[in-house]
Structure formats: structure tokens, C-alpha cells
């Protein structure tokens, strides 16, 4: 897959903000937004899974 394709997929999954779920919740509150795109992707990437 080319760099541009990876970047496009990344932006579609995360939207305009990337980070840990707690940081995204904080950002949504500061922006007075009900939600931010990318919470599921952030959980998959940044949170530890139980063994």
C-alpha cells in the first residue's frame, strides 16, 4: 500500500484528532462536541487488552 493510501485510511479512522481515548474525551469537552471520530480506533491502538 502506498503512503498516500495509508494516510487516507488513517485520517478516515481517526478524523481530526489522534490520541488516547481519555485525551479525546477531554478534547471533545473543550470543543463542546458530543463526540469525536476515532474513539474506536484510539481504543484499539492506545489501550492495553486483557490477556
Image (spheres, rainbow, N blue to C red):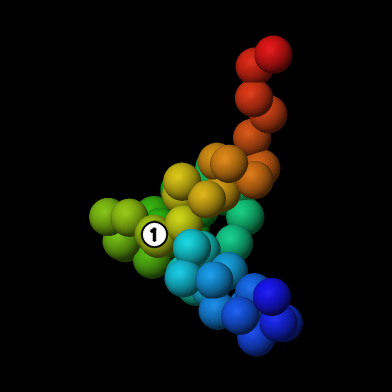
- Position of residue 17 relative to residue 4, above or below, is above
Q: Where is residue 39 in the image (x, y as percent from the top left)?
A: 46, 49
Quadrant containing the N terminus is bottom right
- Position of residue 20 relative to residue 18, above or below, is above
Q: Where is residue 18 in the image (x, y as percent from the top left)?
A: 59, 62
Residue that appears at 64% across and 25% down: 49
Quadrant containing the C terminus is top right
Residue that appears at 68% across and 29% down: 48
Q: Position of residue 46 (x, y in %)?
A: 66, 42
Residue 17 visible to an observer of this rendering: no
Which residue is at the far left? Answer: 34
- Position of residue 22 relative to residue 24, above or below, is above
Task: Quickly name the residue at label 1.
Answer: 36
Q: Is residue 45 rendered to the left or right of residue 42? A: right
Residue that appears at 54% across and 71% down: 9
Q: Where is residue 4 in the image (x, y as percent from the top left)?
A: 65, 86
Which residue is at the far bottom? Answer: 4
Res 30 → quadrant: bottom left
Res 43 → quadrant: top right
Mark 1, Cα crowd under 10 Å, few <14 / some 14-19 / many 20+, is some
Q: Is residue 43 rendered to the left or right of residue 30? A: right
Q: Which of 26 and 12 is in front in this view?
A: 12
Amino acid at each position: 500500500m502506498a503512503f498516500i493510501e495509508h494516510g487516507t485510511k488513517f485520517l478516515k479512522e481517526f478524523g481530526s484528532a489522534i490520541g488516547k481515548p481519555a485525551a479525546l474525551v477531554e478534547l471533545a469537552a473543550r470543543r463542546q462536541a458530543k463526540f469525536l471520530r476515532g474513539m474506536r480506533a484510539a481504543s484499539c491502538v492506545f489501550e492495553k487488552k486483557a490477556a
